[in-house]
Amino acid sequence: MNSTTVRNLLVRGMLAGLGAGVLALIVAYVLGEPNVNSAIGFEEAHAGHSHGDEVELVSRGLQSTAGLATGVLVYGIAFGGIAALAYCFALGRVGRFGPRATALLLSGCALLAVYVVPFLKYPANPPAVGDPDTIGKRTALYFLMMLLSVLLALAATLLGRRLAPRIGNWYATVVAVLAFAVVIALAYTFLPVIDEVPEHFPAALLWRFRLSALGMQLTLWTGFGLLFGELAQRLLRPAPAAAEAVPTAP
Amino acid sequence: MAQPFAQPTAAPAIPDRLPLKAVAPWAVFVGVLMLVLLYFVGAEQGATSVFNGAGVHEWVHDARHLLGFPCH
């Protein structure tokens, strides 16, 4: 139980992130890419700006395959590493959860804090949606929302831990989640609204694009939780296979 | 007849905790490295640029849209 364990968990986290990234990549390619292409079709049909005149640096064929794979896999590895580090802090400190359950719980919370909460305020946009002139503002707001959501999730976890001995696990969890929701609702209310969907952009396409983006993240984090949990279990509880089958504790 | 709600025998103790001192250095160095990777996937050559041009942006273009980052 020392630095070596941390390193081993970190390596496994990055591997699980890579594996989960492959699963998310399949979802991205099959469900997401058709929507990206339709949105680019709309963009070209309504070419109001200079996009078409520029020299094409990377072809669409590469962008939708190797480029997509690079982005999604690096994202998976990076978040896998970060999640593994968070796991090292969380293990044994968030309740009576074993290695696998802790991994899945952490993944679920990460999906919410890193993606779903920012997404509900500033959802993913396909090409053609978003004014290039406001990219700075939109990027800053998106990362701010992400940072806020992650920090608040950490704060809520610490709050729950502090309350648990006094009011019990159940009420401590309820209060912590409620506190998180209230502050997030305030952030939703007071942060500026971004509405840059061009006129006549198909609503159904926007919806499908955003659903596919959400589906990717759901796949990524569920895959990560299960894969990493399995690897962490084998590392931390090296038990013979037969002992696993005995239905004692989860 | 078997007991319907058999109590688990000897539930494992609360799982191993890793000492914070062992995790902290990894968290700092590797954490920063991972954030740099995320920056290059999510934001480089969009709002801010470390390298000139648009090669990185164009290469990860589709991933950036589908991963939810503001792209352009």
Image: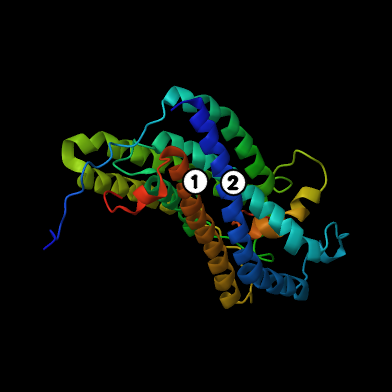
Residue A231 image label: 1
Horizontal side, residue A148 vs residue A31: left or right: left
Q: Is residue B58 left or right of residue A145?
A: right
Helix, strand or loop status at disc 1? helix
- Name the residue rendered at 35%, 40% in the picture: A157
Work out which quarter of the rendered image holds the N terminus of chain B and state it: bottom left
Residue depicted at 60% across the width and 56% down the height: B67
The kind of residue on which mark 2 rests is: Leu
Label 2 near label 1: C-beta < 8 Å? yes
Instruction: For label 1, count other residues whose C-alpha is less than 10 Å away and answer few (under 14), some (14-19) or many (20+).
Output: many
Q: 10 Å neighbourhood of mark 2: few (<14), some, or many (≥20)?
A: many
Q: Which residue is drawn at the image coordinates 36% and 33% (left, top)?
A: B16
Q: Amino acid at mark 1?
A: Leu
Q: Are discs 1 and 2 both within one chain?
A: yes
Q: Earlier in the sequence, mark 1 or mark 2?
A: 2
The subunit carrying tag 1 is A
Q: Quadrant of the C terminus of chain B?
A: bottom right
The residue positioned 52% from the left and 28% from the top of the image is A4
Q: How many marks?
A: 2
Residue A125, given in percent of the width and then of the height, sits at 61, 62
Q: Viewed as shown, does residue A54 lie left or right of A146?
A: right
Whether residue B2 is visible to the viewer of this picture, yes or no, is yes
User: Where is residue A197 shown, x and y percent of the image?
Assistant: 61, 67
- The residue labelled by disc 2 is A15
User: What chain does mark 2 sit on?
Assistant: A
Q: Label 2, secondary structure: give it.
A: helix
Q: CA distance from mark 1 to mark 2?
A: 9 Å
Q: Nearer the viewer, mark 1 or mark 2?
A: 1
Residue closest to the far top: B21
Residue A153 appears at what percent x and percent y? 40, 43
Give percent across and percent down for residue B39.
65, 43
In the displayed structure, B36 sits above or below A71; it is above
